[in-house]
Amino acid sequence: MGRRATLTAALPRDVEMFLEMLAAERGAAANTLEGYRRDLADFAAFASKQGHSPQDANAALIRAYLKHLTGRGMAPRTQARRLSALRQFFRFLFSERLREDDPTTIIDAPKAGRSLPKYLSEAEVDRLLVSAANHAGADGKRLVALMEVLYATGLRVSELVGLPLRAVTRDGLMLVVRGKGGKERMVPLSEPAQDAIVEYLGVRARFLPKGESKSAKGGAKGGAKDSPYLFPSRAHQGYLTRARFAQLLKELAVEADLDPARVSPHVLRHSFASHLLAHGADLRALQQMLGHSDISTTQIYTHVLDERLKRLVQTAHPLAGN
C-alpha cells in the first residue's frame, strides 16, 4: 500500500493524465494501468537522475534508458514492453499538443526472438482434470468447474476468476466474456464444462461472503443481495483471486505428478489454443475465442500448424511411403 502511494505521488501530472486517458477512453483494466504506472515510474526515476522530467525527454535519453535496462540484465522482450509504454505516452503528449515532437519515432525496439508458448500435452491436461475430479465436496466441484471452463475456453486468468454470474448464457452453452478494453466475445463451452458449471452452481452458495444471501440453487434465504460473480469468495474484491487459483493449480499439478513449475493458468490457456489448432481449428476462430485484437498475436501458435502440416505430408502424400 505504501509503495503504491509513493509511486503515485512521484509521477508527474502528464503521466497521470496519460493513465486517466487509458482508463477513460480505452477502458484499460486495473492491472494494465498498474503495469503502465510501474514502467513510467521507473523511467521517471531514471530521467530525474539525469536532470530531466519524463515529458521533456529526448531520443538520446530514451536510448540511454534502454542501455541502462540492458545493464540491469533486463530481457529484450521486457525492454520492448517498456519502450512500448513510452511510445504510447509520448504519442499522447504529441496528440494533446503538450510537446511538439515524439522522440520515440526514431528509436528501434530491442531485438528479441519470439519464444514458443509453453503448453501441456493433452494427456497431461487430462491428468489435471482427473485429479480435480478426485476432490470431494463443494471445493472439489468449484475446482472442477474452474479447470473445465479454463481448458474449454482458454480465458485469461483475470477473465476466469472475475466472470459475472450472468456470463453463462441461459441455455448454458456459451460464455459472454468481457476482455481487454471492455470488448465482449462469446466463447462456446464444452459438454464437460457445461456439466461442471451445473454441478458447481448447486454448491456456489458455500462460497458467498458472509452476510450475502444464498442463491436459489443453493437454498435461497432472505437477506443481502447475492454476489454478482460466478466464483464468489471472501476476498476484498468479492471473487476468487488470481493468486489463490494459481496456488490451487500448483497443488493440483503435484497431485497429478506434474512439475508444478510447468503448470500455470496461462500455460493452460496456451494448451487450449495449441490443442484446438492441432485438431483442425481455424486460426481466425481461435483469435476470436482468445480475445486477441490482432491476428499476429494468435500466430504464436503456428508452430502447431507447422507440425500438423508435416504430419499431413508424411501420411497423406502419395510418395510419403517411398
Image (spheres, rainbow, N blue to C red):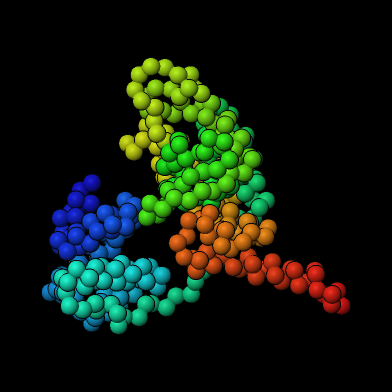
Rendered-image quadrant of the C terminus = bottom right
The residue located at (61%, 35%) in the rendering is: 195
Q: Quadrant of residue 78?
A: bottom left
- In this orientation, does residue 265 appear? no
Of residues 215 and 267, which is closer to you in this image? 215
Against 127, residue 74 (above or below) is below
Q: Is residue 59 left or right of residue 188?
A: left
Left or right of 22: which side holds 144?
Answer: right
In this rendering, is residue 207 above or below 122? above
In the rendered picture of this protein, how many numbered marks are placed on residues?
0
> Which corner quadrant of the image does residue 314 belong to?
bottom right
Residue 112 appears anywhere in the view? yes
Depicted 31 relative to depicted 137: above or below: below
Q: In the orientation shown, which residue stands out farthest toward the left?
A: 51
- Pinpoint residue 80: horizontal percent, then vertical percent: 37, 71
Q: Residue at x 63, y 56 (%)?
A: 275
> Percent from the top left, x then y, of residue 259?
57, 52
Q: Is the residue 122 above or below the residue 72 in the image? A: above
In the rendered structure, the answer to whether residue 246 lies left or right of residue 252 reads left
Q: Position of residue 273 (x, y in %)?
A: 58, 57
Q: Give me the residue at 21% from left, 73% from top.
A: 94
Q: Quadrant of residue 149?
A: top right
Q: Residue furthest right?
A: 322
Q: Name, please, the residue furthest toward the front.
A: 170
Residue in front for this viewpoint, 220 or 36: 220
Residue 197 is situated, as x and y percent measured from the top left of the image, at 55, 35
